[in-house]
Amino acid sequence: MSNLDNALRWLRQAERDLDDARFVMTGKRFGLACFLCQQSAEKSVKAFLYASGAESVWGHSVAELLRDAVDFDPSFEEMIPLGARLDKYYIPTRYPDALPGGIPADAYDQWDATRAIETAEAIVSHVKQRIKESR
């Protein structure tokens, strides 16, 4: 499989995760929507890295992956704070012991999910544009 084919696979899943985030938000599953947004951004940045020729891509931090992406395209520098925002949803949205009391399902609201979706959309859109321009 070529790097571009692999990248497009990752990008398709990133888009699906973002679509799933929108879907679960309609059911008021706000914590899950936030987590899916983090996953979407993570997978989209991995898609960019593969499309740029990276042989192996490791890690789950969107911000760290974006730092790696800067090596291939400086425009990703401005995305790092957005990635850091989404990284906050990687563990606390899923594990009861990651928050002080209560459960993740009760800790996130529509505002959190809306902001997470907007943030993931910005990252995925940026990645899609960069991959398109690199072809």
Image (spheres, grey):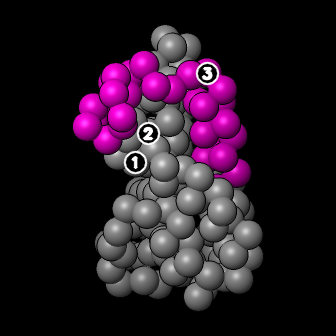
- Disc number for residue 65: none
Is the Cβ of the residue at disc 1 closer than 8 Å to that at disc 2? yes
Q: For the point 36% across and 34% down, which residue is it?
A: 100
Q: Is residue 47 left or right of residue 103?
A: right
Residue 106 image-quadrant placement: top left
Task: Please state the horizontal and vertical placement of residue 103, each as a whole percent of the image.
Answer: 33, 24
Q: For the point 46% across and 44% down, which residue is it?
A: 89
First along the sequence among labels 1 and 2:
2
**Mark 2 Cα shell of 10 Å, populated few (<14), some (14-19), many (≥20):** many
- Disc number for residue 90: 1
Determine if residue 48 is in view. Answer: no
Magenta extent: 94-123
First along the sequence among labels 1 and 3:
1
Height in image: 11 above or below 133? above
User: Mark 3: which amino acid?
Assistant: Gln
Which residue is label 3 attached to? 110
Q: Residue 54 or 27: which is nearer the viewer? A: 27
User: Mark 2: which amino acid?
Assistant: Phe
Q: Residue 67 in magenta?
A: no
Q: Quadrant of the N terminus?
A: bottom left
Q: For the point 25% across and 37% down, which residue is it?
A: 97
First along the sequence among labels 3 and 2:
2
SS at mark 2 in the image: helix
CA separation in Å, label 1 and label 3: 17 Å
CA separation in Å, label 3 and label 2: 13 Å
Q: Quadrant of the C terminus?
A: bottom right
Q: Is residue 111 left or right of residue 46?
A: right
Task: Please state the horizontal and vertical placement of residue 2, each as a whole percent of the image.
Answer: 38, 76
Residue 32 image-quadrant placement: top left
Q: Residue 77 or 105: which is nearer the viewer? A: 105
Task: Please state the horizontal and vertical placement of residue 17, each as a whole percent of the image.
Answer: 46, 39
CA separation in Å, label 1 and label 2: 6 Å
